Image (tube, rainbow, N blue to C red):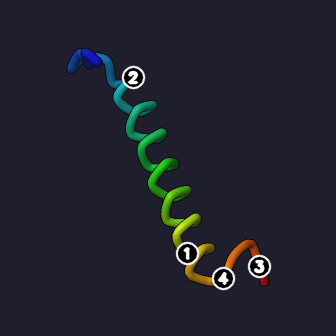
Amino acid sequence: MIIPLVSWESGTIIIGVFVVVCIVLVGIVVAMISGGKKKE
């Protein structure tokens, strides 16, 4: 992936996707630790 420094929109999108992926992964780990798909 080549990311031009002047392309702020692309950078923002990539950062946004990265943040979302991290949140999802953390959520999955927390769900597994909590004992499955139980929701309060």
Binning the other alpha carbons within 10 Å of mark 3 as few (below 14), some (14 to 19) or many (20 upward) gives: few
Amino acid carrying mark 3 in the image: Lys
In the displayed structure, 17 sits above or below 19; it is: above
Distance, label 4 to label 2, CA atoms, is 38 Å
Relative placement, left or right, of 24 versus 22 is: right
Labels 3, 2: front one: 3
- CB-based contact (under 8 Å), mark 3 and mark 2: no
Disc 2 is placed on an element classified as helix
Q: Residue at x 74, y 72 (%)?
A: 37
Distance, label 3 to label 4, CA atoms, is 7 Å
**Residue matched to label 4:** 35
Q: Position of residue 36 (x, y in %)?
A: 69, 75
Q: Residue at x 25, y 15 (%)?
A: 2
Binning the other alpha carbons within 10 Å of mark 4 as few (below 14), some (14 to 19) or many (20 upward) gives: few
**Residue matched to label 2:** 10
Amino acid carrying mark 4 in the image: Gly
Distance, label 1 to label 3, CA atoms, is 11 Å
**Residue matched to label 1:** 30
Disc 1 is placed on an element classified as helix
Q: Nearer the viewer, residue 3 or 37?
A: 37
Q: Earlier in the sequence, mark 2 or mark 1?
A: 2
| Tag of residue 21 | none
Q: Earlier in the sequence, mark 1 or mark 3?
A: 1
Labels 3, 4: front one: 4
Q: Position of residue 40 (x, y in %)?
A: 78, 84
Occupied quadrant, residue 24: bottom right
**Residue matched to label 3:** 38
- CB-based contact (under 8 Å), mark 3 and mark 4: yes
Q: Earlier in the sequence, mark 4 or mark 2?
A: 2
Distance, label 4 to label 1, CA atoms, is 9 Å
